[in-house]
Image (cartoon, helix red, strand yellow):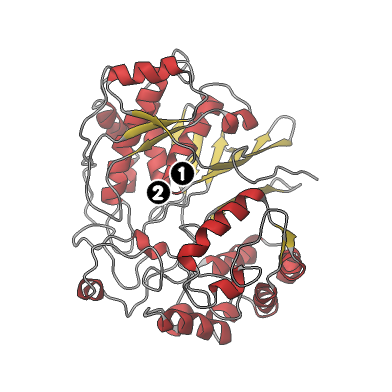
Amino acid sequence: SGRSPRKLTLEHFKQQGLTRIPAHGALPVSVPGCADGWFTLHGRFGRLPMAQVLAPAIRYAREGFPVSELIAHYWQRSLPTLGRFPNFKATFTVDGERAPRAGEVFRNPALASTLEALAQGGRDAFYRGGLAQHIAEAVQAEGGFLSVEDLAAHRSDWVEPVSVKYRGYDVWELPPPGQGITALQMLAILEGYDFSKIPFGSPAHIHRFVEAKKLAFEDRAKFIADPEFAKVPVPELLSKAYADRRRALISDTRPARRVDAGDPALREGDTIYLTVADGTGMMVSLIQSNFRGMGSGITPKGLGFCLQDRGELFTLEEGRANTYAPGKRPFHTIIPGFVTKDGEPFLAFGVMGGEFQPLGHVQVLMNLIDFGMNTQEAGDAPRIHHEGGSDPAGAHTPLPGRVELERSFPYETVRDLMLLGHSVGYNLGNYGGYQAIRYDTKAKVYFGASESRKDGQAAGY
């Protein structure tokens, strides 16, 4: 997670007449932290030389790979918006105008050279010297403020994960500025219901899930921010007493028409997900993202990649926890998940999909723990989305929103939810992308699962 440019101030946005940070261009670009994250993780846990680790990616970048249907579709959709930025078309099109079609081999030799520089020079090859200079120049040429000093000052931080216990399982997420605690809050609220008596996909199941989401997401909008800049009451938000208070606000017979953030009694003082496991029992849950499809559009010449636009997720409204400030990390949607039971690993998993990710985490875990599904079924089961509520990067709008269901739910369920007072509709997407590895401690074997709605693969050796 990278920090905002130190020379970009809140006042600059005001002078530009902006009420929200733009989705594309130079202003939403924060320091790219991904490469440093790779090397920091490798330094503690890696067993192979980084040159060997990066070799397959370098080969695919130089020799090419056939583009899948889904990626080709979204790639073409990004061109009208991002093609106006210098070097984007030169890097990400086949003939200077169009995206690669499904099955067409795409090559990116510039990215291969960048990865080779990292393999040879380590993380400093990215954050100091020529690569850093190219990145900073590309941002500043488009009116941005990211500097070589910002890149040189970047560091990754080892943090303690946060957790709640859900029916005997310890569910682990990363702490703020990510939204992992939102999934944990939802689970803490939902643990108060006996889902052994509530069938999967029933109106009672969906109603309670949606109402728990409304409550947790209002807290998300109010409290989640960079803990170096704001007091984020994580222990209080995850406490059983607070979950009990929030659950008491849920009616069994009608949806909430207005939902506000709670008072946990503050104490003073373009996403990919992958999970891997090896023969020694080590498991990794990892997620990274350029945000908004392919990112900001800012494409440093000759480097083969587009910079992320995660800074869009700051708010420009003064006085909020996530208000923009120089050198601050923005609110993040991307959350890798992990579950243990009795101190042993149980599940490494993630569900890509922006703000849907906490909803996806909770649904997968309920499917496994409450409804007895296997690892693949837990991802294949129809999903529930709820659109509405306050936004960490926008205005406070604690409105009821709309329940969106995949079409596998029967119409009787839709009808009963409408009779309760929910607004219900369908959505073609926005249901995330799931990957998981479950570990069986008795048999000492892994079970892999991959998303059926997107590209993905479960593979063993």
Task: Tell me the tag on residue 357.
Answer: 1
Q: Position of residue 398 (x, y in %)?
A: 22, 40
* Residue 282 in view of the camera: no
Quadrant in the rendering for residue 378: top right
Image quadrant in which the C terminus is located: top right
Q: Nearer the viewer, residue 158 or 247?
A: 247
Q: Nearer the viewer, mark 1 or mark 2?
A: 1
* Residue 311 in view of the camera: yes
Quadrant in the rendering for residue 139: bottom left
Task: Tell me the tag on residue 133.
Answer: none
Q: Earlier in the sequence, mark 1 or mark 2?
A: 2
Q: Nearer the viewer, residue 96 or 398?
A: 96
Mark 2: amino acid: Gln
Q: Nearer the viewer, residue 69 or 110?
A: 69
Quadrant in the rendering for residue 198: top left
Compared with 242, 128 (above or below) is below
Circle 1 — which element? helix
Drawn side of residue 287 relative to residue 310, left or right: right
Distance of label 1 from label 2 (alpha carbons) = 8 Å
Which residue is the site of mark 2? 179
Compared with 24, 231 (above or below) is above
Q: Position of residue 317 (x, y in %)?
A: 21, 60
Residues packed near mark 1 inside 10 Å, few (<14), some (14 to 19) or many (20 plus): many
Kindly identify the residue that appears in the image at 47 percent across and 58 percent down.
291
Kindly identify the residue that appears in the image at 67 percent across and 51 percent down.
68
Q: Position of residue 246 (x, y in %)?
A: 26, 31
Compared with 293, 135 (above or below) is below
Asked whether the beta carbons under mark 1 and mark 2 sit within 8 Å of each other, the answer is: yes
Counting the numbered discs, the total is 2
Compared with 231, 126 (above or below) is below
